[in-house]
């Protein structure tokens, strides 16, 4: 469809590609051409496309009941909440429909806890980090440490300040009498696949403990098995007070979740926050099936092993390539940082029927499904590395 012919707002830059069917790590376009998916709709379809365990549960639910209202008890919500709290440090769950909404809920909970429970209404400021990404609502784009998402949207809500990532000394200096929380990603996804340094995260947790601040971990991209643990904070031996999920939680059904520790539960009293669709029968059915499959098939562990294999393969295959600056990641969230913008390279890789996505201008991001076969991985990496080699040869 040519520009001008579309009835949509042009707020997405889209590739000239569209898919009609998906199965596992494969997608087919309208001409029947098959693609290998190494991005999973941006770390969403962690069980592959149309995973049987989820589609079966969804079909059953579609035939039974879709929606009542959060004015009534929703057994699926209780069940998914229990699955999440039994397998994490969280004690209470709020369900919504997206990542931004989950972070919005986290921001509201942190403020309300200080105002209603702690009794310190002047303590409302949240420290976030440069290059972070937390969403597109007014509060979450303000929390985001990148100017490009804020352009043209002033006035922005108050109460956010930004610290350099992986710099504990600078962070400590920014904590003041108004600070109520630190909000952080364990791997900055949109910012360029930048994993946090373990010592830095230790220090962040320690500072929160010492100064009585809430630690909010944004697990929207990293959560649900992606980084080699069910939740990325487990890689660092810390426990957040609040953490947020969305992308991988419903295998593609829209769902978000915000989890908090017991002391925060009463800060969200009846009527203080809500969502019409949040945690409805369909999205929570997908969430339950996704979590059960993750646990039964030990997919976080698989992500750890296969992620290690991908990084070491890439390091072997790309050794000496002058275009490649660094290969890094955590589990199966992996970045290839190049010395030049990667948009054109990604298009060339796409033309060879492999789907990857950028993370910032210079990083090729890989987020394959956690059930992808090793053969598919090898084939995909061969294509990517051949494109990078060819480009490097052309540059000399
Ligand atoms: C994708 C993402 C969000 C926003 O999620 P939406 O569902 O698009 O609102 C927030 N934080 C992180 C870390 C993300 O990767």
Image (cartoon, rainbow, N blue to C red):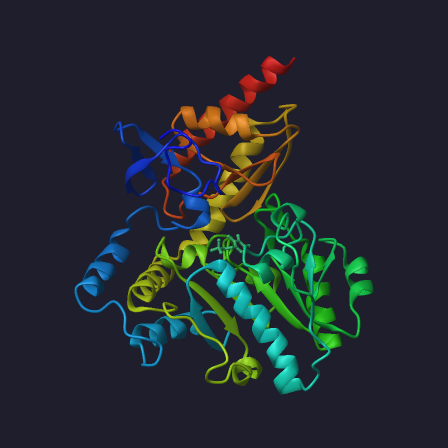
Q: State how many labels appear.
A: 0
Q: Nearer the viewer, residue 351 or 66?
A: 66
Q: Nearer the viewer, residue 166 or 103?
A: 103
Identify whether 189 is placed above or below 223.
Answer: above
Q: Residue furthest left?
A: 63
- Horizontal side of 369 relative to 209 (left or right) equals left
Identify whether 115 is placed above or below 371.
Answer: below
Identify whether 311 is placed above or below 283.
Answer: above
Residue 237 at what x, y percent from top left?
61, 65
Q: Which quarter of the rendering shows the C terminus?
A: top right
Residue 65 at what x, y percent from top left?
21, 69
The residue at 63%/52% (across/down) is 132
- Horizontal side of 63 relative to 128 (left or right) equals left
The residue at 57%/56% (across/down) is 134
The residue at 24%/61% (across/down) is 57
Identify whether 139 is placed above or below 15.
Answer: below
Q: Nearer the viewer, residue 213 or 161?
A: 161
Q: Which quarter of the rendering shows the N terminus?
A: top left
Residue 171 at what x, y percent from top left?
77, 61
Residue 308 at what x, y percent from top left?
52, 44
Answer with the quarter of the image where residue 343 lies. top right
- Horizontal side of 161 relative to 313 (left or right) equals right
């Amino acid at each position: 469809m040519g520009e001008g012919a579309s009835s949509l707002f042009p707020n997405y830059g889209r590739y000239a590609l569209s898919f009609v069917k998906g199965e596992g790590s494969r997608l087919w376009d309208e001409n029947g051409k098959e693609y290998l998916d190494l991005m999973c709709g941006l770390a969403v379809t962690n069980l592959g496309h149309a995973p049987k365990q989820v589609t079966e549960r969804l079909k059953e639910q579609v035939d039974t009941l879709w929606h009542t209202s959060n004015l009534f008890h929703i057994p699926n919500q209780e069940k998914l909440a229990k699955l999440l709290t039994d397998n994490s440090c969280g004690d209470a769950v709020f369900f919504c429909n997206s990542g931004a909404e989950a972070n919005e809920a986290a921001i509201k909970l942190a403020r309300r806890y200080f105002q209603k429970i702690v009794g310190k209404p002047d303590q409302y400021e949240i420290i976030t980090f440069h290059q972070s990404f937390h969403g597109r609502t007014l509060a979450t784009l303000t929390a985001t440490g990148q100017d490009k998402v804020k352009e043209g949207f002033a006035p922005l809500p108050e109460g956010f300040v930004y610290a350099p990532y992986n710099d504990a000394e600078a962070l400590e200096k920014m904590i003041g009498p108004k600070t109520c929380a630190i909000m952080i990603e364990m791997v900055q996804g949109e910012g360029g696949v930048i994993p946090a340094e373990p010592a830095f995260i230790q220090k962040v947790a320690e500072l929160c403990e010492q100064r009585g601040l809430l630690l909010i971990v944004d697990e929207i991209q990293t959560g649900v098995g992606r980084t080699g643990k069910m939740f990325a904070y487990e890689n660092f031996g810390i426990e957040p007070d609040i953490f947020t999920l969305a992308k991988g939680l419903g295998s593609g059904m829209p769902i978000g979740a915000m989890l908090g520790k017991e002391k925060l539960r009463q800060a969200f009293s009846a009527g203080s926050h809500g969502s019409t669709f949040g945690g409805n029968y369909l999205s929570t059915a997908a969430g339950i099936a996704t979590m059960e499959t993750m646990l039964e098939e030990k997919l976080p562990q698989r992500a750890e092993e296969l992620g290690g294999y991908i990084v070491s393969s890439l390091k072997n295959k790309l050794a000496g390539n002058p275009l490649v600056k660094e290969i890094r990641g955590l589990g199966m969230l992996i970045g290839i940082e190049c010395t030049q913008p990667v948009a054109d390279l990604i298009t060339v890789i796409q033309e060879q029927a492999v789907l990857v996505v950028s993370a910032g201008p210079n990083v090729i991001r890989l987020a394959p499904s956690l059930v992808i076969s090793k053969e598919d991985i090898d084939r995909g990496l061969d294509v990517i590395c051949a494109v990078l080699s060819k480009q490097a040869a052309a540059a000399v």
